[in-house]
Image: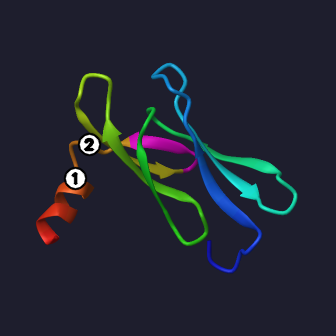
Amino acid sequence: MENDTNEILVQAFSGGEESPDVLYKVNIYTSRWTRVAKMPLSYMDIVTNNKGEPILAFGMDTYGNYKEFQFGNGEWKDISDKLNFVKGLKSHG
């Protein structure tokens, strides 16, 4: 994270759809964990801004459907039908 040498981001995997993963900031000197956001689904990849704030999560749901979520105002919004971040990356790579 920009200008923060004390904290790192850690995604804690829950291992189940009923209990989605959680994103934390962890202070590397005090070992203090601060919850940043609960992920919309388990096993999702996450994109953050330079402050460590989540902005996008993407991955597969339990049925194998590709899903994308945007984070704002403390909650995730399903944008799967509006944007396809990964397909956009593949077309440029």
Amino acid on which the number 2 mark rests in the picture: Ser
Q: Is residue 7 left or right of residue 56?
A: right
Main SS of the magenta segment? strand
Give the residues drawn in magenta, as a range.
Answer: 73-77
Residue found at x 56% / y 29%: 14
Quadrant that contains the N terminus: bottom right
Numbered mark located on residue 80 in the image: 2
Q: Is residue 56 left or right of residue 6?
A: left
Depth check, front residue: 11 or 82: 11
Q: Which residue is mark 1?
A: 84
Is residue 63 shown in magenta? no
Depth check, front residue: 71 or 46: 46
Can you give x and y, in whole percent of width and height, for residue 60 in the image? 30, 35
Residue found at x 75% / y 49%: 34
Could you say whether the residue bearing mark 2 is in a helix, strand or loop?
A: loop
Can you give x and y, in whole percent of width and height, for residue 16 in the image? 48, 22
Contact (Cβ within 8 Å) of mark 1 with mark 2: yes
Residue 26, picture quadrant: bottom right
